[in-house]
Image (tube, helix red, strand yellow):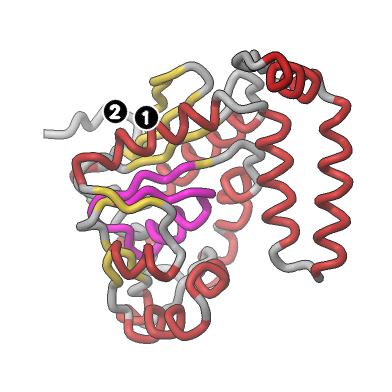
Amino acid sequence: MPDSAAPPVLLERPLAGVALLRLNRPHATNALSLELQALLSQHFAELGADPQVRCILLTGGDNVFAAGGDIGSMAGVGPIDIYQRHTERVWAPIQHCPKPVIAAVCGYAYGGGCELAMLADLIVAGRNARFCQPEIRIGIMPGIGGTQRLVRAVGKAKAMRMALTGQPISAEEAWVAGLVSDLVEDDQVQARALELARVIAGMPALAAEQIKEVILAGMDAPLDAALALERKANALLFASRDQKEGMQAFIEKRPARFEGW
């Protein structure tokens, strides 16, 4: 039986520079209750500002990532109540987190769970994982990025099919479509995600943050504007100690010792 006193999000520190956030409502297939969302938002705000954190790993565990929103908290409310929840503010610390974020997905990533996974920079999925935007089946539509991020990830045709039918796609389909970055056996998901987090956490932190910022900012910008962002960010990194250390280590044929600034 789950510990009812345990918080709906657990914070772990499995490796130096790596923070692991684990969704912890197994009795409700990790449905995204208001409490869970608020705690997740708080954790991301704090970890995003923590200089000791180089990478954030987000998981729901070995059996399910998140089966969607908490329908019980929505069924009887009106449009003003929904609007005043301001989910865009709750999810903003996740969306704008400067640190690289990896989602480790086993089992269902449905509705809000799929939208949460899409906020990550990398998604490691098990072969039996499923991704779905089933909101249309209960008379609504995705409301926290499930139309906009999905079309940017998998293209118009696949996004339309998912959102209009509410039918899931397999991890294999998600990988082929470009939604998933790594596809592994179910029992290897956590290990692969943790290994990726270890590698990223060992990289120069300023370079990692600039890469993430420029890729995301440039996705919807004209190519010339995006290339200008890239050039300036690259030039900025030449003011960092890690750039000096990285290049000197390369010349001296030794491992670099990055300090994060």
What stretch of residues is rendered in magenta? 102-125
Q: Nearer the viewer, residue 8 or 18?
A: 18
* Circle 1 residue: 10
Q: Position of residue 155 (x, y in %)?
A: 52, 77
Q: Nearer the viewer, residue 258 or 150?
A: 258
Residue displayed at 36% across by 44% down: 104
Q: Amino acid at mark 1?
A: Leu
Residue displayed at 24% across by 40% down: 188
Q: Are marks 2 and 1 in contact (CB under 8 Å)?
A: yes
Name the image quarter holding the N terminus. Answer: top left
Task: Classify 10 Å Cα crowding around label 2: few (below 14), some (14-19), many (20 and above).
Answer: few
Q: Nearer the viewer, residue 244 or 186?
A: 244
Q: Amino acid at mark 2?
A: Ala
Name the image quarter holding the C terminus. Answer: top right
Front tag of 2 and 1: 1
Q: Is 200 above or below relative to 181?
A: above
Q: Is 4 above or below relative to 12?
A: below
- Label 2 SS: loop
